Image: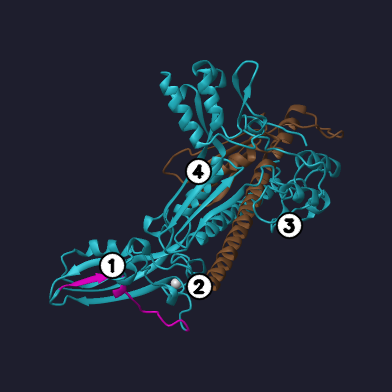
Amino acid sequence: MGTGVKIHAGEGRDGAVTVELHGEDHTLGNALRYVMMKNKHTQFCSYSVPHPSEHVIHLRAQAYPDERGGDESMEDAENAESEHVAVRSMDLVHQGLDDLVAMCDAVKRTFEAAIDAHDAAASSGQAAESQYSR
Amino acid sequence: MEEHYSGRAQPGPETFESTGNDLREYIVYREAPGASPCAPIKQPPSYQFKPINWKTRKVDRQNLTVYFSLSRTEASTRLKAATRGQAMPNARFPTLELSECTDESLKFVLSRTDASVANALRRVMIAEVPTIAIDLVNISFNSSPLHDEFIAHRLGMIPLVSDKAADMNYTRDCECEDFCDLCAVVFQMDVEGQVEGTTVTSQHLQNVWFDPDTYPRASTVEPVHWSCGAEHPDPALDASASGIIIAKLKAGQRIKLEAIARKGIGKEHAKWSPVATVSYKSEPVVSLRLDELNNRLEVAQRQELLKWSDGALKWDARTNKLEYDDAFKYGRTALSNDFVRKCGEMLVQVGSHPSEVILLNNDPSRFEFFVESTGAISAPVVVVNAISVLRNKLQELQTSLRAETLDRVEHGLY
Ligand SMILES: [Zn+2]
């Protein structure tokens, strides 16, 4: 099972990026798509499994063009625009991973706290029971 | 707090933006009272909230510096535009309520999230949490009625206590030649049928590396003998006492073998899956087509129905019709099962089909999970391990994505 990533960016004028994630499948792809769609800078995000017997997914992201820096002095405004968006699109992917990591941590914290609360309740219940039987 | 929906319509106001990079504000928002059944957690999570500071980003290669090849002002402008809201995740954190919890099974509700997240958790629990299972069997003698492959397969299916699986290596990653106590466990078995007949069970498997001082990890691995005690109140019939049946021998028949157990994941073979089942379902939300209801039922029936509504409906004296009460509109109460049953009966009486009036919709952000362990790892630990597995995957991706991004920046591809 191969691992690693490959980035395809700046290949079109729309500034979208496509990232090949090797060794991943729907498990990560769909969750990542969800958190990236929650990003207010995301104009488009989707993933696909190009072939079911190859362990790779393609994640495509495109950011909204945002306000530009005042000192933008590139000659070809169109290229500058798409390059600008591509950088932002790539940031969406990084942000998506960050968000999902944070979400994992949050679920883990909440779950462990719930288990601790449950154990505490169970042990105090047992204590009460044994007291009663005595 | 601005609500913003991007791209496809998403249910619920789930996207939010902070007015600044104030970590406290963010934490307070996430841990608002009532948001979580647990006490608010004062400590920020281990996830590092990095303030937006393009200068530090510029020199910190660990922290993705896609902007360092640009001019200072340009980088600053782009970074400000692109990383607004950087210091916090964009999606809401899910909440979790535990309802039943034993070593064998677990019920909890994961809410305020999407099916994709629930499904990721389910898929990881089934297929990617590592356990230990018998993988290689050397049979030196077998005169039982079962052929060698049959026995090897049955041995593979026996759950083994895998609490230490996280500390063990995959054999393919291990530095040993063939296998060792860091990546494998060896069991031996030699059973001969007695005159009265003998049942070969998992209890006949002897761990060769049983000494906990020499083999701290391998010695903990043993077949899971328990079954649900409630099903067999008689200890003589309880599988936890007798073990898992492998074969039955008549007088003189014999099985002698050596079984090597290894670490693996369910994706490779289902015998490594730590769970018998993981499922989630979403909770139905009942609503009514009130105009249809008022049209089809008689006044007396409507008045009767009001008594069953438990405050969710109210009576409009002017029109003699049922209306939603404010409590229902604001989600403080819901229509009960009894109400739905009664309402359905009345509709059938007047010749209507209940589905024409009663609407059952699934709450798309609430998932009732049920996890049942095989016994290899206790059910709560399966969940915790699954989250860790998911997190490790993400971190590996982050590392390679950062490296790839930097590579592209250095080659002037941005
Ligand atoms: Zn080894």
Residue type for callout 3: Pro
Q: Secondary structure at mark 1?
A: loop
Mark 2 → mark 1, Cα distance in angstroms: 29 Å
Identify the image quadrant of residue A123.
Answer: bottom right
Identify the image quadrant of residue B210.
Answer: bottom left
Mark 4 → mark 1, Cα distance in angstroms: 43 Å
The residue singled out by tag 2 in the image is A133
Picture colour for chain A: brown
Q: Which mark is residue B237?
A: 1
Residues A102 and B334: in front is B334
The residue singled out by tag 3 in the image is B44
Q: Nearer the viewer, mark 4 or mark 1?
A: 1
Is the Cβ of the residue at disc 2 closer than 8 Å to that at disc 1? no
Examine the structure image and report whether residue B201 is included in the region drawn in magenta: yes
Ligand number 1: quarter of image: bottom left
Q: Is residue B77 visible?
A: yes
Residue type for callout 4: His
Identify the image quadrant of residue B98.
Answer: bottom right
Is the Cβ of the residue at disc 2 closer than 8 Å to that at disc 4? no
Q: Residues within 10 Å of mark 1 (few under 14, many from 20)?
A: few
Q: Of label 3 and label 1, which has the lower sequence position?
A: 3
